[in-house]
Image (spheres, rainbow, N blue to C red):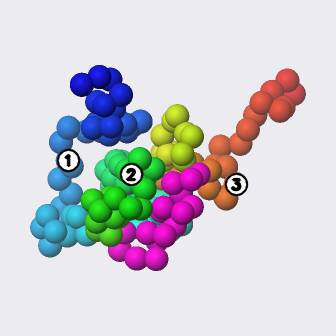
């Protein structure tokens, strides 16, 4: 088996994946945890930028990256990829957006498909870290302004 064959077997995620999953407290148990993550991934695909707690954003980012990566690699004719998209996307009309809009957008990307920022914490407000999770190339204005044009001022 040469290197080209191995790259098809191993997912080419461009972010660091934690070896252990986080333990989110949920009154519904592990099913409730997965349902929250499914809703988060669905909201990310739908709105392309969301604000939420940092641990959940980091966990949902891994699943969203894997979903987009498999959609690019295998396409919509692959049965396992379609089942995975059907499971992770609660709103079924977003499966079309995943394969027809996002997969062509990220086809030539060599960096990760998502971007995560730490949101500013209101002082003396909550102690929990907030994060902003977004898909790259979204239609919204950038969160961090580009300072290259006026760096000499």
Note whether 30 is above or below 70 in the view shown. below
Instruction: Kindly report the distance in space between the C-alpha atoms of the residues bearing marks 2 and 3.
Output: 31 Å
Q: Are marks 2 and 1 in contact (CB under 8 Å)?
A: no
The residue indicated by pointer 3 is: 141
Residue located at (49% from left, 46% from top): 113
Question: Which callout, 2 or 3, points at the residue further toward the start of the chain?
Answer: 2
Note whether 12 is above or below 143 in the view shown. above
> Is 27 within the magenta?
no
Q: Quadrant of the C terminus?
A: top right
Q: How many marks?
A: 3
Q: Nearer the viewer, residue 77 or 67?
A: 77
Q: For residue 74, which numbered disc appears in the image?
A: 2
The location of residue 50, given as percent across then percent down, is 49, 61
> Magenta residues?
89-105
The residue indicated by pointer 1 is: 21
Question: Which callout, 2 or 1, points at the residue further toward the start of the chain?
Answer: 1
Q: Residues within 10 Å of mark 2 (few under 14, many from 20)?
A: some
Q: Give the quadrant of residue 12.
A: top left
Residue located at (27% from left, 59% from top): 80
Residue located at (20% from left, 47% from top): 21
Question: Which callout, 1 or 3, points at the residue further toward the start of the chain?
Answer: 1
Note whether 89 is above or below 105 in the view shown. below
Q: Residue furthest left?
A: 29
The location of residue 34, given as percent across then percent down, is 23, 64
Instruction: Kindly report the distance in space between the C-alpha atoms of the residues bearing marks 1 and 3.
Output: 32 Å
Instruction: Kindly report the distance in space between the C-alpha atoms of the residues bearing marks 2 and 1.
Output: 26 Å
* For residue 62, side relative to residue 32 (left or right): right
Q: Secondary structure at mark 2?
A: helix
């Amino acid at each position: 088996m040469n290197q080209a064959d191995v790259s098809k077997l191993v997912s080419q995620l461009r972010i660091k994946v934690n070896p252990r999953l986080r333990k989110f407290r949920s009154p519904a148990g592990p099913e409730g945890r997965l349902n929250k993550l499914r809703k988060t991934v669905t909201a990310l695909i739908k709105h392309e930028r969301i604000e939420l707690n940092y641990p959940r954003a980091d966990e949902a980012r891994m699943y969203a990256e894997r979903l987009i990566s498999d959609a690019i690699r295998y396409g919509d004719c692959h049965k396992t990829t379609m089942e995975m998209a059907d499971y992770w996307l609660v709103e079924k009309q977003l499966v079309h957006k995943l394969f027809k809009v996002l997969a062509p957008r990220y086809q030539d990307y060599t960096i990760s498909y998502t971007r995560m920022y730490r949101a500013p914490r209101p002082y003396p407000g909550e102690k929990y870290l907030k994060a902003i999770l977004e898909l790259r190339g979204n239609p919204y204005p950038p969160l961090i302004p580009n300072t290259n044009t006026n760096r000499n001022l």
